[in-house]
Amino acid sequence: MLGIERVALAHCVGRVLAEDLLAPADLPAFPASAVDGYAVRAADAGRTLHVAGESAAGRPFEGKVAPGTAVRILTGGVLPDGADCVVMVEEVEEKGETLTVPAGLKAGQNFHPPGADLHAGERVLPGGEQLGAAELGLAAALGFPRLPVFRRPRVALMSTGDELVEVGEKPGRGQIVDSNRWALLAALREAGAEVKGLGIGPDEPDALRKLVVDALREVDVLVTSGGVSVGTHDLVKPLLESLGTVHVGRVKLKPGKPFTFATLPEGRVAFGLPGFPVSSLVTFEVFVRPALRKMQGLTRQQRPSLPVRLGYDARATADRTEYQRVTLRREANELVAETTGSQSSSRLMSLAGAHALVRIPAGDQGIKAGTMVDAMILALP
Ligand code: AMP
Ligand code: MG
């Protein structure tokens, strides 16, 4: 887990609360009228009362509501001492400085007593939760201008491969545009990381090493794409082996077989993602995103999953678990999953617009259309 910092509310959106937030005081702090009307005593029901003054929001009436009197009150105004209920303006008959209140008033009606929303000492937000609009509103209402949040993971991001050119440049023969860096930049930011872009690393051991070693000084995590398969130009795995310990160098996953994970000195970690665009994003989802969420102290690391009905026959791969990309549609009371088409690891169109990933266990069985399966939800339709 990363360290804790105190951050101004304006910069807290999307951050993860590092400690339980307790209410320092009751909310509301005073009995506050819920309507426009008159603060009265329930015992005066049915009587004609003298109007003694007004309690507006932010401008309380300082006197007391004595028997036989009422105080005009506006929404958010403090219920004056002596009064025990508010009668709505629509329910009284006003005549000059007097008014007649209906029979059958109930003590406690039409105002929020102190602590109605929150009691002093109550846990308002648990540590490990991500902060959004309502959470930040609550923090402000309770008087916290800053909140303790976990530091964001700093991630160095690099594409590798001599075939890559920058987006906007025209690829020559045999060259392709580096798209992984932009896809992974988005995925990293969405996962809460602060990204330091390292550009395109060459397929040349010394230059690659220098780029990585320099960058590591300032980050917690290294994420690379490409260069982890077994070709002679695949230099990331040997580089990580020389810098730290490679724990995973291959996984039984499709797409994403060459996924590599290493620990590096001083608590840093490195993820060597495969080069094929879908492989890099799927392994990001499966391994990197949960790790980044854990580093930020989030209680929930996994995407939500929901039962869906397969709308197609899913073929399995003999020796690898497959994460197939699907769209979802609502049908009756269910979600039905349809394949996004060719599941080639180079075909980003299989992931663009996908609503979920469906896990197909390795084997020769596959899963027949009509079967209920769990889907890892990326976005609901
Ligand atoms: P590699 O794992 O380095 O052998 O890469 C496998 C394939 O993934 C390459 O042949 C490219 O077609 C593709 N690829 C690698 N890096 C990128 C990248 N940054 N952007 C888009 N495609 C890439
Ligand atoms: Mg390569």
Image (tube, helix red, strand yellow):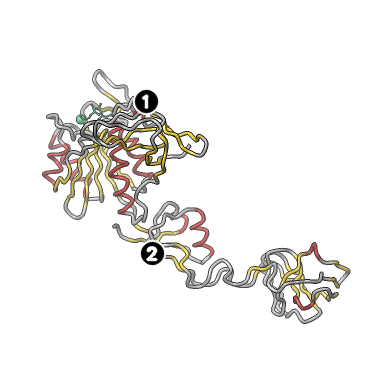
Horizontal and vertical percent for residue 69? 80, 78
Disc on the earlier residue, 2 or 1: 2
Q: Is residue 354 left or right of residue 116?
A: left
Q: Badge 1, how many Cα within 10 Å: few under 14, some, many 20+?
A: some
Image quarter of the N terminus = bottom left
Horizontal and vertical percent for residue 189? 37, 44
Which quarter of the figure has residue 88? bottom right
Which residue bears the numbered disc 2?
Answer: 19
Residue at the outermost right position: 95
- Label 1 sits on a secondary structure element that is loop
Which residue bears the numbered disc 1?
Answer: 341
Horizontal and vertical percent for residue 261? 20, 44
- The answer to whether the residue labelled 2 contacts the one labelled 1, judged by CB atoms less than 8 Å apart, is no
The amino acid sitting under disc 1 is Gly
Which quarter of the figure has residue 281? top left
Ligand 2 is found in which quarter of the picture? top left
Is residue 25 placed above or below 225 in the rendered structure? Answer: below
Does the numbered disc 1 mark a residue whose Cβ is under 8 Å from ligand 1?
no
The amino acid sitting under disc 2 is Glu
Q: Nearer the viewer, residue 254 or 265?
A: 254
Q: Residue at x 25, y 51 (%)?
A: 220
Q: Badge 2, how many Cα within 10 Å: few under 14, some, many 20+?
A: some
Q: How many marks?
A: 2
C-alpha gap between disc 2 and disc 1: 45 Å
Q: Is residue 307 left or right of residue 281?
A: right
Q: Residue at x 42, y 38 (%)?
A: 308
Horizontal and vertical percent for residue 365? 27, 32
- Label 2 sits on a secondary structure element that is loop
Q: Is residue 43 left or right of residue 224?
A: right
Does the numbered disc 2 mark a residue whose Cβ is under 8 Å from ligand 1?
no
Q: Nearer the viewer, residue 232 or 114?
A: 114
Is residue 61 placed above or below 177 in the rendered structure? Answer: below
